[in-house]
C-alpha cells in the first residue's frame, strides 16, 4: 500500500523530536573544524523548529562541508561538486512540502557552482543555504579558493595567491531578487544558532555565509578575530538579531542595522574594518519561484487525459471529415 | 505512367505513385508554411506524406544567398510514406540563388520541374537581373524544365505586401498541379490562422484561389496522386511535438531544459501546453543545472525529463553519472545534431550513440533507446519513463534533427492511465528496510522517497553500501557496480527480439537504428523487388540490446550497418583493417557478438535517400562488388 502525498499533507500532526533524532554517525571532520559547530546549531534548529525528519532534506555538493547530510538523520543528498543548488531547486519545485537545506563550500558555491549561485538567488526558492566558507579547498588538501585572502600560500599558490578574495556577501547582495543575507562566525555558537534560525524562518532563499575555521589548512586565519571580540561587529535590530545579554558583555562592537536597507547592507558587507555578523538583508516580499510556477490545478489522470486529448484534437485528421476541431 | 483524364478538369492529369516537392525561399518568406500546408492538405486527402524542413543555419541569412535556402521538402505518395525519399521531382523557388543552393547540394532529380519567381529578370539592379538570367540558362542547359512565374506581380493585385503572400499563391499553384481539393486547402488555412482575424483567413484564401486559377490557365501539366481517405483518426505532427506529447502522456510533471537546436522546439511546445495539465517547463541557467534540477525533482519522487542536443548532452554527463550511481530515475531526450562541438546545429546526424552508451566516467550503465519514426517519438518517452522508474535508471532517448522536424501521420493514440506515473509513495518504510537493498537477481532496490517516515538516509555519488553509507571497501564497491549492471540484464530479459524486414534469410542483412528505419526499409523493398536477397533489422534498444540479435545475424553471410555517423573507408589510402574506425553501432555489434559487421555511413547532415542506399547495398552484394565512393 502506498500513501499519496496529498494524504500525508492532510495528515499533518504535532510532533516533538529529541536532538538525537537528528544525529546520524560520528562526524569525520578534523578536531576544531568549524563544520562541527554548524552541525550542532543545525541539529538544535531542527529540534526547536520541530522539523519532521522525513520531511527534511539536506542537499550538498562535494567538499569537507558537503559531508554534512551524512550526519543528519533526515533525508540527504550528497551530490556532485558545484551542483547542490540546482538539485535542491528541483527537489523544492517537485515537493514544496519538504524543508530544504543546502550545505556548500566556498569552492563548491563560489567557484565551480558560481553560475548556479547567481541564479539560485534570482529564483528565490524557499531554502536555507549555508556557505561553509573556510577560505580554502579542504577536501582536496589545500588549494586556494575564490575566497582565500590575497597571498594565501597553498599547494597551487606556494608563493601566495594572486588575486583579491571574492566577497560572497557583496556578490549575493548584488543579485536581483536577493531576499535574505546573513553572516556569522563558527566560534560564537549561539549566534550561529540564532542566525540560522532566522534564515530558516525566512520564506525564500536564505543565504548564510558562515566563516568557518579550517585548523588543518588555514590555521590561525581567524586567531586575532577570536582573541579580540571587537574585530567582530554584531548587527542588531528589532527586526533583525537581538543579542543575548551574556553575549552583549563580550561583543561590544555592535551596529544597529535595519535589514530592510539594501544599500546600507552593501556598505556593511564591503567594509573591511571588522567582520559583520548578523542579518545584513531581509526582504520577505520577494516572489518565490516555486510559488510563481506552482501548478494552478491538481494533477489528476482525468486532467492529463483531457489535456492530451485537447492537444491531439488540434492535429487530428478525422476519417469522416476534412477539418480538425479547433 | 498512364495518362488518365480527371473528371473535374479540362487538363489531363498524369497519375503518379509519388512525388517529392520542394518549396524554397529566403527565410521569412513563408516557404515552410507553404510546404507544411501542402503536406497537411495531401494528408487530409488521404495521401501518405513525409515532410523535411530545409533550415538555413542562420536566423536571417543574407537575402538571395546560395546557403540561405529555407523551406520544406514534401513527399506525397499513394501509399504510406516512410522517409523523405530521393531527389526532388518539382521545386518551387522564390529566387534563383536559393534554388542553386539546392541544385548544387544534389537535391534535384535530373530534369526536375522548377517553378521560379520570374520578377528578378526585370530587376532594377542589372547584376541581379544578369545573375538570374544566367542561372535560368544554366539550369535549362542542364536539362531542368524551368517555368518562370510572375508570383509577386500576381500577388500585388491582391495584397499589400506581396512578399508575405507569395507562399499562399504558390500553395494554390501546387494544389492545382497535384489536383488537391481546394476546399481542403481553405479548411487548412482556417486552421492555421485560427487565432488571427477573419480578414487574415480571407486574404490567404484569396491568394490560394488566385494561385490555383493562375496554374489552371497557364500550366500545361497536371498530376494526381491517388489517395485513400483514412479510416481511423490520424495525427500529423513532427517528431519533437510527438515527443512533447509523449511527456504529457507519460505523467511526468517536470521538464528541465536549456535552449539548444534542434531539441528546443520540443520544449517550446511543452511550455505552451504543459501547464494546462499541471506540468512545468523549467528553463535552467545551463545544461548542468537542467540535468541537476531534473535529478533533484526525480529524487523527490517525480521522475523528470531533461531535453537537449549534443553539446548540452556533453554538459550533462557528470550529473548523469550521479543519477546512475545514486539510482535516481531520469529521462533524457537527446535530439542529435551534427558534431563534435557546435558542429551543424540544424543538420541531422547519429553521432552521439557511443557517448550515450558509454558516457560519464567510470562504469555508468544507462538505458539507451532510439526513436525510429514520428510515432515512436511519442511512445518512446512513455516507455522511457516507465523503465526509468521501474529500474531506477537513467533512460536516454535518442532522436535526431531529421525526426525533430519531419512530419508523418500516425494513428491517434488512445490514452491509457497505465501510461501515467504512480502517485508519489509516502507510506512508512518498514523497520529494517535498507535504501539499497539490491535484489540479488535483478539488482533492483526499492527507492525511499523523501517524506516516507522511517526512510531517512543520505544518498550519495560516492560508492556506498546497502545502507547508503559511504564505502571505501573494495568488496562493497564491486557489489554496487555489479547490481547496477545487473539491472540492464534484467531489463534485457524483458525485451522482445527485433523483427526482420524482408526475408528471414538472405545474402545480406542491413542493421540500422534511429531515424533511418523508413529509408533503409524502403531501399530493402526496392532491392527485393529487383530480386535481391536483402533484409534489414532495426534496433530500438541500443543498451541493453534485445536477445536474438546474434541468431538473426547468423542467418546472413553478410551483415552491415547503415548509419549517419563517421566511419573510415578503405578508399582512403591511409586506412586499412588495422586502423579503420567503424560506425558506432557496427563497433558495438562487432564487440558484443564477434560478428564481422561491416558498415556504411554518411555525414552530410541530410536525411539518407533510398536510391543512394540501394546503390550502396548493391555494391556490397556478392558478385556485385564495385568500388563505391563514400560521400
Ligand atoms: C568536477 C569536480 N572537480 C573537482 C573535484 C575535486 N574537488 C572535490 S572537493 C573540491 C573543493 C572543495 O572545496 P570547498 O568547496 O571549499 O569545500 P571544503 O572541502 O573546503 O569544505 C574539489 C576541487 C570534484 N570532486 N569534482
Ligand atoms: S580539512 Fe579543514 S574543513 Fe576539512 S575537516 Fe579538516 S578542518 Fe574541516
Ligand atoms: Mg572550502
Image (tube, coloured by chain):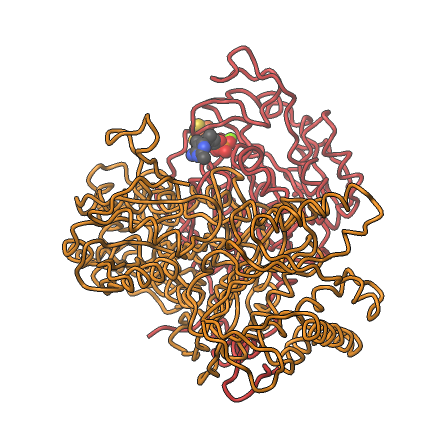
Residue A119 drawn at (x, y percent):
63, 46
Q: Residue furthest top?
A: A159
Residue A9 drawn at (x, y percent):
50, 71
Residue at screen point 74% across, 35% down: A254
Rendered hue of chain A is: red
Left or right, B69 with respect to B293, comes to right
Residue B577 drawn at (x, y percent):
24, 32
Rendered hue of chain B is: orange
Question: Which one is nearer the viewer's eye here, B400 or B130?
Answer: B130
Residue at screen point 63% across, 74% down: B176
Quadrant of the rendering where the C terminus of chain A is positioned:
bottom right
Residue at screen point 46% across, 42% down: B314
Looking at the rendering, the quadrant in which ligand 2 lies is: top left
Question: Which one is nearer the viewer's eye here, B57 or A165?
Answer: B57
From this view, report whether residue B601 is shown above or below residue B54.
above
Left or right, A306 with respect to B97, comes to left
Res. A218 visible in picture: yes
Amino acid at each position: 500500500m502506498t500513501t499519496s502525498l496529498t494524504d500525508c499533507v492532510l495528515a499533518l500532526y504535532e510532533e516533538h523530536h529529541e536532538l538525537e533524532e537528528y544525529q546520524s554517525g560520528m562526524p569525520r571532520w578534523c578536531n576544531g573544524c568549524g563544520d562541527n559547530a554548524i552541525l550542532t546549531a543545525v541539529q538544535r534548529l531542527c529540534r526547536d523548529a520541530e522539523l519532521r525528519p522525513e520531511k527534511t532534506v539536506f542537499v550538498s555538493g562535494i567538499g569537507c562541508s558537503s559531508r554534512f547530510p551524512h550526519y543528519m538523520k533526515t533525508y540527504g543528498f550528497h551530490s556532485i561538486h558545484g551542483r547542490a543548488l540546482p538539485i535542491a531547486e528541483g527537489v523544492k519545485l517537485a515537493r514544496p512540502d519538504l524543508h530544504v537545506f543546502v550545505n556548500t563550500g566556498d569552492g563548491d558555491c563560489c567557484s565551480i557552482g558560481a553560475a548556479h549561485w547567481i541564479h539560485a538567488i534570482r529564483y528565490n526558492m524557499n531554502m536555507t543555504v549555508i556557505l561553509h566558507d573556510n577560505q580554502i579547498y579542504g577536501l582536496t588538501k589545500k588549494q586556494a579558493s575564490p575566497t582565500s585572502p590575497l597571498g594565501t600560500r597553498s599547494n597551487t599558490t606556494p608563493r601566495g595567491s594572486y588575486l583579491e578574495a571574492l566577497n560572497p556577501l557583496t556578490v549575493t547582495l548584488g543579485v536581483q531578487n536577493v531576499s535574505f543575507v546573513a553572516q556569522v562566525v563558527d566560534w560564537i555558537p549561539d549566534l550561529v544558532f540564532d542566525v540560522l534560525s532566522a534564515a530558516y524562518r525566512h520564506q525564500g532563499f536564505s543565504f548564510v555565509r558562515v566563516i568557518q575555521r579550517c585548523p588543518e589548512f588555514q590555521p590561525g586565519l581567524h586567531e586575532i578575530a577570536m582573541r579580540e571580540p571587537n574585530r567582530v561587529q554584531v548587527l542588531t535590530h528589532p527586526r533583525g538579531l537581538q543579542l543575548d545579554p551574556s553575549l552583549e558583555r563580550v561583543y561590544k562592537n555592535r551596529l544597529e542595522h535595519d535589514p530592510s536597507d539594501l544599500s546600507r547592507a552593501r556598505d556593511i558587507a564591503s567594509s573591511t574594518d571588522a567582520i559583520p555578523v548578523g542579518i545584513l538583508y531581509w526582504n520577505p516580499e520577494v516572489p518565490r519561484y516555486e510559488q510563481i510556477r506552482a501548478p494552478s490545478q491538481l494533477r489528476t489522470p482525468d486532467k492529463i487525459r483531457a489535456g492530451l486529448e485537447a492537444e491531439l484534437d488540434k492535429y487530428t485528421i478525422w476519417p469522416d471529415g476534412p477539418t480538425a476541431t479547433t | 505512367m498512364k495518362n488518365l483524364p480527371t473528371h473535374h478538369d479540362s487538363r489531363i492529369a498524369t497519375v503518379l505513385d509519388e512525388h517529392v516537392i520542394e518549396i524554397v525561399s529566403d527565410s521569412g518568406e513563408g516557404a515552410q508554411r507553404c510546404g507544411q500546408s501542402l503536406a497537411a492538405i495531401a494528408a487530409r486527402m488521404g495521401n501518405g506524406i513525409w515532410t523535411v524542413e530545409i533550415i538555413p543555419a542562420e536566423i536571417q541569412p543574407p537575402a538571395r544567398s546560395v546557403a540561405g535556402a529555407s523551406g520544406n521538402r514534401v513527399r506525397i505518395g499513394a501509399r504510406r510514406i516512410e522517409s523523405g525519399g530521393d531527389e526532388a521531382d518539382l521545386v518551387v523557388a522564390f529566387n534563383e540563388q536559393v534554388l542553386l543552393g539546392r541544385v548544387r547540394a544534389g537535391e534535384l532529380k535530373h530534369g526536375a520541374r522548377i517553378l521560379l519567381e520570374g520578377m528578378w529578370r526585370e530587376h532594377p539592379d542589372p547584376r541581379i537581373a544578369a545573375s538570374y538570367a544566367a542561372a535560368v540558362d544554366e539550369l535549362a542547359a542542364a536539362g531542368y524544365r524551368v517555368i518562370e512565374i510572375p508570383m509577386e506581380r500576381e500577388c500585388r493585385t491582391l495584397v499589400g505586401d506581396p512578399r508575405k503572400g507569395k507562399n499562399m499563391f504558390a500553395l494554390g499553384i501546387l494544389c492545382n498541379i497535384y489536383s488537391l481539393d481546394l476546399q481542403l486547402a481553405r479548411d487548412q488555412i482556417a486552421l492555421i490562422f485560427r487565432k488571427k482575424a477573419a480578414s487574415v483567413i480571407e486574404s490567404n484564401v484569396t491568394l490560394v484561389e488566385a494561385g490555383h486559377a493562375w496554374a489552371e490557365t497557364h500550366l500545361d501539366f497536371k498530376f494526381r496522386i491517388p489517395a485513400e481517405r483514412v479510416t481511423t483518426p490520424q495525427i500529423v505532427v513532427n517528431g519533437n511535438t510527438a515527443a512533447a506529447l509523449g511527456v504529457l502522456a507519460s505523467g511526468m510533471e517536470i521538464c528541465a531544459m536549456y535552449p539548444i537546436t534542434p531539441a528546443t522546439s520540443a520544449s517550446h511546445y511543452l511550455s505552451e501546453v504543459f501547464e494546462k495539465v499541471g506540468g512545468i517547463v523549467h528553463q535552467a541557467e545551463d545544461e548542468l543545472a537542467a540535468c541537476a534540477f531534473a535529478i533533484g525533482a526525480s529524487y523527490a519522487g517525480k521522475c523528470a525529463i531533461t531535453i537537449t542536443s549534443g553539446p548540452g548532452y556533453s554538459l550533462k554527463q557528470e550529473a548523469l553519472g550521479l543519477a546512475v550511481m545514486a539510482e535516481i530515475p531520469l529521462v533524457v531526450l537527446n535530439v542529435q545534431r551534427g558534431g563534435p562541438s557546435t558542429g551543424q546545429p540544424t543538420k541531422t546526424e547519429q553521432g552521439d550513440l557511443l557517448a550515450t552508451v558509454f558516457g560519464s566516467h567510470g562504469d555508468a550503465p544507462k538505458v539507451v533507446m532510439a526513436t525510429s519514426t514520428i510515432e515512436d517519438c511519442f511512445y518512446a518517452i512513455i516507455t522511457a519513463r516507465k523503465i526509468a522508474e521501474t529500474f531506477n535508471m537513467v533512460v536516454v532517448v535518442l532522436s535526431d534533427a531529421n525526426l525533430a522536424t519531419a512530419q508523418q501521420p500516425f494513428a491517434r493514440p488512445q490514452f491509457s492511465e497505465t501510461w501515467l506515473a504512480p502517485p508519489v509513495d509516502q507510506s512508512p518504510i518498514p523497520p529494517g528496510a535498507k535504501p539499497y537493498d539490491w535484489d540479488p537477481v535483478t539488482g533492483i532496490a526499492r527507492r525511499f522517497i523523501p517524506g516516507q517516515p522511517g526512510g531517512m538516509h543520505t544518498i550519495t555519488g560516492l560508492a556506498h553500501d546497502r545502507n547508503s553509507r559511504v564505502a571505501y571497501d573494495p568488496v562493497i564497491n564491486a557489489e554496487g557496480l555489479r547490481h547496477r549492471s545487473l539491472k540492464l540484464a534484467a531489463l534485457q530479459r524483458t525485451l522482445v527480439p527485433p523483427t526482420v524486414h524482408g526475408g528471414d534469410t538472405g545474402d545480406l542483412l542491413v542493421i540500422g537504428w534511429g531515424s533511418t528505419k523508413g529509408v533503409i526499409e524502403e531501399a530493402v523493398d526496392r532491392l527485393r523487388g529487383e530480386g535481391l536477397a536483402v533484409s534489414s533489422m532495426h534496433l530500438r534498444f541500443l543498451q541493453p540490446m534485445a536477445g536474438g540479435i546474434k541468431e538473426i545475424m547468423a542467418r546472413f553471410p553478410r551483415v552491415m550497418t547503415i548509419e549517419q555517423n563517421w566511419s573510415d573507408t578503405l578508399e582512403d589510402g591511409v586506412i586499412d583493417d588495422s586502423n579503420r574506425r567503424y560506425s558506432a553501432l557496427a563497433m558495438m555489434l562487432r564487440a558484443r557478438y564477434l560478428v564481422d559487421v561491416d558498415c556504411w555511413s554518411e555525414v552530410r547532415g541530410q536525411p539518407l535517400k533510398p536510391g543512394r542506399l540501394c546503390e550502396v547495398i548493391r555494391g556490397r552484394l556478392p558478385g556485385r562488388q564495385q568500388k563505391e565512393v563514400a560521400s
